[in-house]
Image (cartoon, rainbow, N blue to C red):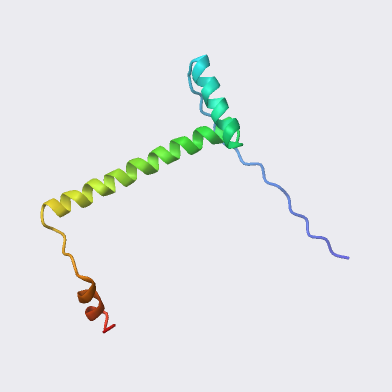
């Protein structure tokens, strides 16, 4: 008989501390409970969602700036079909 054994590897993860009021802590814990996740995961999710939102807003601002400065070229549906040889 042959057995495959998978050994779990312990990974060190640094800790981050936050200073919050008791009320803020209660709100965070309530949010985590409603989401069905632990407090650490709730805080990480909120942070990375905010980070993604900021990145998206930066991309939108850059697009709008290029559009306002006339750096964008637009193609009609018909032009795209013709360029791709789909007509």
- Residue 23 sits above or below residue 5 on the image: above
Q: In which quadrant is the N terminus drawn?
A: bottom right
Classify residue 34 as left or right of residue 3.
Answer: left
The reply, left or right, for residue 80 in relation to residue 33 is left
* Picture layout, residue 68 above or below residue 85: above
Q: Residue at x 39, y 40 (%)?
A: 51
Image quadrant in which you'd find residue 53: top left
Q: Quadrant of residue 75?
A: bottom left
Residue in the foreground of this view, choosing between 26 and 54: 26
Give whichever of 18, 57 is nearer the camera. Answer: 57
Position of residue 44 measured from the top left corner of the image (x, y, whole percent): 50, 36
Q: Which residue is at 58% across, 33% downward?
A: 34
In the image, 63 versus 34, the foreground residue is 34
| For residue 24, above or below residue 57 | above
Query: Which quarter shows the C terminus?
Result: bottom left
Residue 6 location in percent, x, y?
A: 74, 54
Residue drawn at x 27%, y 80% as measured from the top left: 84
Q: Is residue 80 left or right of residue 11?
A: left
Picture coordinates of residue 17, whole percent (x, y)? 51, 24
């Amino acid at each position: 008989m042959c057995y495959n054994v998978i050994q779990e590897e312990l990974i060190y993860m640094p800790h981050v501390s936050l200073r919050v009021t008791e009320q803020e802590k209660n709100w965070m814990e309530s949010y985590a409970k409603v989401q069905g996740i632990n407090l650490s995961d709730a805080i990480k999710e909120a942070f990375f969602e905010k980070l993604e939102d900021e990145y998206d807003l930066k991309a939108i601002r850059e697009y709008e700036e290029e559009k306002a400065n006339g750096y964008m070229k637009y193609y009609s549906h018909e032009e795209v079909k013709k360029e791709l040889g789909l007509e």
